[in-house]
Image: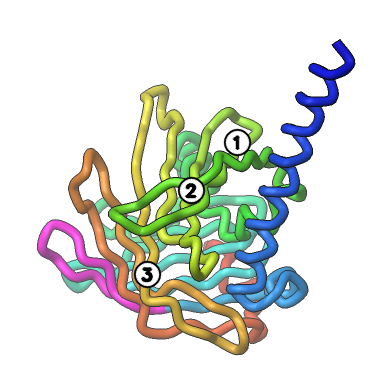
Amino acid sequence: MRKIAAFILGISLLSAIGLQDVLKKNYQAKGGLEKLKSLKTLYAEGKITAQGMEMPFKVWVKFPKKIKMETMFQGQTMVQAYDGETAWWIMPMISPEPQVMPPTQAKQFKEQNQFRDPLVFYKELGYKLEYLGEGEVEGTPVYKIKITKPNGDVLIYYLDKDSGLEIKAEFFGKMQGREVHGSTYFGEYKKVDGLLFPFYIESRSNGKVVSQASISKIVINKPIDDSVFKMKK
């Protein structure tokens, strides 16, 4: 029995060491853990392509909770934002005035737009990480890390074995009571003030491309006033 217990303990230790080794490689590839944790603000702009349409967008983020997204569509600007307390939006097709998001949409928006890196802030977020070993993504050797959120939703991150960078993430969870599965692909990494960011993000569902985001500009750690995120009354 002692030998069996020692064997199980040894396997557990190997898994823990494997996870920390993979995380360390990821942190180093992206610019270092200290620098990643020092990220205070982020501004990005670019365009989203979906259903044959191009939609310019701008995003302001003030960590850990504040976010504002503007998307230009057919000459109108759609706004989605969260000021740390209230989620609100401007939906021009419904009303030109800012409105508080309905509870279901607000919950979904806040859950989908957690911009803190889950591989870096998993303890603060209450996420559980598990190393799943090695695999492949479209022929590229990868490390696999499973992330379980407190609400039961699951993310699986695939990290390139050579670079240590994320190249794919899978989501398994529920939205409005329905089971949802989607994939996100990351590419075109570029350095911004010592940190690496993906400048191309592609979303797929059932193997089909749903949207493609091409980022043209990222600015980090520049002051952003809280008023940017507040709903104007």
Q: Mark 1 points at which residue?
A: 148
Q: Name the residue under label 2.
A: 112
Q: Mark 3 points at which residue?
A: 187
Q: Which amino acid does label 2 sit on?
A: Gln
List the single residue furthest toward the left: 52
- Give whichever of discs 3 and 1 has the lower sequence position: 1
Distance from Cα at disc 1 to Cα at disc 2: 14 Å
List the single residue furthest toward the bottom: 193
Q: What stretch is highlighted in magenta?
A: 45-56
Where is residue 51? Give x, y as percent.
13, 57
List the single residue furthest toward the front: 3
Q: Tell me which residue sits at (46%, 71%) in the image.
A: 59
Q: Tell me which residue sits at (44%, 72%) in the image.
A: 198
Q: Tell me which residue sits at (59%, 74%) in the image.
A: 30
The reply to whether residue 84 is in sight is yes
Distance from Cα at disc 3 to Cα at disc 1: 24 Å
- Give whichever of discs 1 and 2 has the lower sequence position: 2
Q: What residue type is labelled 3?
A: Gly
Where is residue 32? Give x, y as percent.
70, 75
Tell me which corner region of the image, top left, top right, bottom left or bottom right, holds residue 187: bottom left
Q: Which amino acid does label 1 sit on?
A: Thr
List the single residue furthest toward the top: 1
The reply to whether residue 100 is in sight is no
Q: What element carries label 2?
A: helix
Horizontal side of 171 relative to 212 (left or right) equals right
Residue 204, relative to residue 115: is it above or below? above
> 14 or 150, which lies in front?
14
Magenta span main SS: strand
Horizontal side of 39 relative to 211 (left or right) equals right
